[in-house]
Amino acid sequence: MSSSLDLKLDSLLRRHDELRDLMSRPDAGADFSKYSREFSDLTPVVETILALRTAQSELKDSEILLKDPDCDSDMRKMAEEEKRSLEKLIPDFLKKVQIALLPKDSADEKSAILEVRAGTGGDEAALFAAELFRMYQRYAESKGWKFEVLSIADTGLGGYKEASASINGRGVFARMKFESGVHRVQRVPATETQGRVHTSAATVAVLPEAEEVDIQIQEKDLRIDVFRSSGPGGQSVNTTDSAVRIVHIPTGVTVQQQDEKSQHKNKEKAMKVLRARLYEMEREKLANERAASRKEQVGSGDRSERIRTYNFPQGRVTDHRINLTLYQIDEVMVGKIDEFVEALIAEDQASKLAELAN
């Protein structure tokens, strides 16, 4: 282990102790929650550092014992077994520590806005968009997150032209952000009489939910129009001007909301989506400025590229970014996507570790 890494680990241990002392002070006051949050975030890292240091110390003890000419055969055998075991454990601890030290995406702990839109493929694409939306809803439920539908524009045939939802919980964006992109489906549509496999697509956007402190929006920069709701989802509210359209004049970003009967609630939901879109635009701008090549932007949520294919006749789902194929399409479509999520997170971490090593 390099001396620079050792010094970094020492500083984290000292900071953890310092935070414990600061929290115990009677004058901590308003700073207590800030100290507590940092202490909580550091604790699992510190536990891994201490486990690594303990394993390294025990390995040294075993090596010293093995060099002792007075060590009897039973003790030597036990020391050799312990040495082999520790030599396997230490690289794992070291990797965990290095991952914990990777620069954090400031949005990772945030809730998220999910947007799913039908792409090429007509009614079949809309049906697939609806299935993807339900897949994420079930995934969110399995994680104990709150899934709140913001808007749905349905086709009247069971499909969705587009749908959006707010997913609330800690660390939602960290686990959902790699879902952004073009999702392709290959199957025989119900209306296909020749039994031919058709290819359709839907786009998914996952945006970190922005708070007012993240994005300051000036009233003078907004044009707000109210109008009468209509179409699927609006039939029950089309007697009043309750629908809201908000245009952010400097960027041209437009958000429309009509699912609620209350104009106030529609405006509230529209502002939530607008903040998320403007926040993501700012994040993408910064990411593009920092990135020296397209490869460094893996996982940034570029929606122009196909990321995953769902092939129903073969029962497989393939993620093209990590070349992972699972023959579990039924399980995936009911929200069991953790295997993809974990693999994508691991790939992102490996990529960042490789960059640090260079």
Image (cartoon, helix red, strand yellow):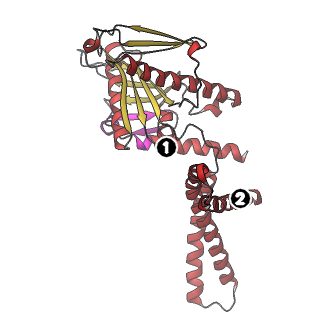
Looking at the picture, tell me which residue is in the foreground, 163 or 42.
42
Looking at the picture, tell me which residue is in the foreground, 79 or 53.
53
Q: Residue at x 37, y 16 (%)?
A: 263
Instruction: Assess disc 2: are there few (<14), some (14-19) or many (≥20) residues with their C-alpha within 10 Å of its C-alpha.
Output: few
Amino acid on which the number 1 mark rests in the picture:
Ala
Q: Which element is circle 2 on?
A: helix
Q: Residue at x 34, y 40 (%)?
A: 141
Instruction: Assess disc 1: are there few (<14), some (14-19) or many (≥20) residues with their C-alpha within 10 Å of its C-alpha.
Output: some
Q: Residue 251: give x, y in percent of width and height.
A: 59, 14
Q: Residue 69: give x, y in percent of width and height.
A: 69, 90
Q: Image check: 343 left or right of 153?
A: right
Q: Which element is circle 1 on?
A: helix
Considering the image in quadrants, where does the N terminus appear? bottom right
Would you place residue 24 above or below residue 168 in this image?
below
Q: Which mark is residue 343?
A: 1
Q: Residue 11 carries which label?
A: 2
Amino acid on which the number 2 mark rests in the picture:
Ser
Asked whether residue 331 is drawn in magenta, I would say yes
Q: Image check: 336 left or right of 225?
A: left
Residue 98 visible in this rendered orientation of the protein: yes
Considering the image in quadrants, where does the C terminus appear? top right
Q: Residue 70: give x, y in percent of width and height.
A: 67, 92
Spatial CA span between label 2 and label 1:
31 Å
Q: Give the range drawn in magenta.
A: 314-340
